[in-house]
Image (cartoon, rainbow, N blue to C red):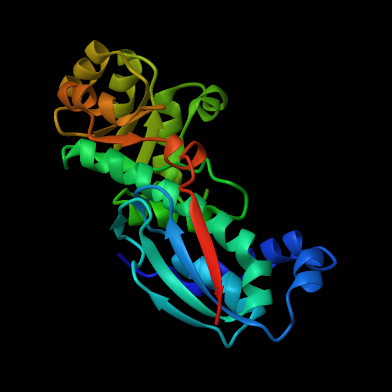
């Protein structure tokens, strides 16, 4: 698993801190001496997969560049409830002011990685778990990173990252065969993925040379029939709001990939805490 590049989160963290800080942390400035120092422990309140720890630490470091961090459980670690994942030492005021921004990011990304890991474990290597572009604005790089931490695969990162022909494209192009032909003619170097809604459209897509057929929540019988028609000429990606318990049926019916928007848009956050003591 590659490390998360700082460029992916520095500006996100800066803007999140500014949003939360407003004109200043009224409570901390009234209660905590500016020179006071503290040691803070980051912990998970429930079991989960750690993801986004560097982004959380960045929130503290932007307010106190001199703080020190000891990481116990790096990104990708599978942790039990109440697991300590890092210890931070530095100015108490900076830790208090950055706390909510850091915990919001960390809890959200841990939630994505945790749900993804559940899906990947349930798939057992029999099909690939893929995310979508249904991400929160400006957080896509972080959220897709969390999917990778959980063992999933990133779908398109942006509109320039591949050709995926969907229902609205098809309406405007006139047909599956016409849309695929146009895509292959204009970008012969890029594999074409196309959404199909019937077995007739499966045949059209295959004849036109599509590399991946996207089918939304198909009936098992239709999925099996589409798989038989493909005969190794194209892969089948099933799309829908599937859970871990539904993957066995998709594998049995012939899916090669399953794209799941809920990996990101519906993943419950993992509750993360920061407990401070005087240092």
Looking at the image, the residue that sits furthest to the right is 23
Residue 44 position, x and y percent, is: 42, 55
Residue, x 38% and y 64% (percent of image)?
84
**Residue 85 falls left or right of residue 278:** left
Rendered position, 172 above or below 191:
above
Quarter of the image for residue 2 reads bottom left
Residue, x 36% and y 47% (percent of image)?
114
Image quadrant holding the N terminus, namely bottom left
Residue, x 38% and y 70% (percent of image)?
3
Q: Of 193 and 278, which appears nearest the observer?
A: 278
Residue 87 position, x and y percent, is: 45, 74
Residue 275 position, x and y percent, is: 53, 64
Q: Of 133 and 172, which appears nearest the observer?
A: 133
Image quadrant holding the C terminus, namely bottom right
Rendered position, 255 above or below 55:
above
Rendered position, 40 above or below 196:
below
**Residue 95 falls left or right of residue 140:** right
Quarter of the image for residue 74 reads bottom left
Q: Of 173 and 262, which appears nearest the observer?
A: 262
**Residue 176 falls left or right of residue 224:** right
**Residue 10 falls left or right of residue 54:** right
Q: Is residue 223 visible?
A: yes
Q: Of 172 and 18, which appears nearest the observer?
A: 18
The total of numbered circles placed on residues is: 0
Residue 113 position, x and y percent, is: 38, 50
Q: Is residue 261 visible?
A: no
């Amino acid at each position: 698993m590659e490390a998360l590049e700082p460029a992916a989160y520095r500006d996100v963290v800066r803007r999140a801190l500014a949003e939360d800080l407003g004109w200043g942390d009224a409570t901390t400035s009234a209660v905590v001496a500016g020179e006071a120092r503290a040691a803070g422990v980051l912990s998970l309140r429930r079991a989960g997969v750690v993801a986004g720890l560097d982004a959380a630490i960045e929130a503290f470091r932007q307010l106190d560049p001199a703080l020190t961090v000891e990481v116990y459980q790096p990104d990708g670690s599978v942790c039990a409830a109440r697991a300590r994942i890092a210890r931070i030492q530095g100015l108490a005021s900076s830790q208090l002011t950055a706390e909510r921004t850091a915990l919001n990011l960390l809890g959200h990304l841990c939630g994505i990685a945790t749900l993804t890991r559940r899906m990947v474990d349930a798939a057992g290597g029999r099909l690939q778990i893929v995310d979508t572009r249904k991400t929160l604005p400006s957080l896509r790089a972080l959220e897709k990173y969390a999917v990778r931490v959980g063992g999933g695969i990133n779908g398109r990162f942006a509109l320039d990252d591949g050709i995926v022909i969907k229902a609205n494209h098809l309406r405007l192009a006139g047909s599956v065969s016409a849309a695929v032909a146009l895509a292959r003619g204009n970008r012969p170097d890029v594999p074409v993925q196309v959404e199909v809604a019937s077995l007739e459209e499966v045949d059209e897509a295959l004849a036109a040379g599509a590399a991946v057929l996207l089918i939304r929540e198909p009936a098992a019988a239709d999925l099996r029939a589409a798989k038989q028609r493909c005969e190794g000429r194209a892969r089948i990606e099933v799309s829908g709001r599937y859970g871990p318990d539904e993957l066995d049926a998709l594998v049995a019916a012939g899916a090669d990939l399953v794209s799941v928007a809920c990996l990101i848009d519906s993943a419950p956050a993992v509750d993360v805490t920061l407990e401070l003591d005087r240092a």
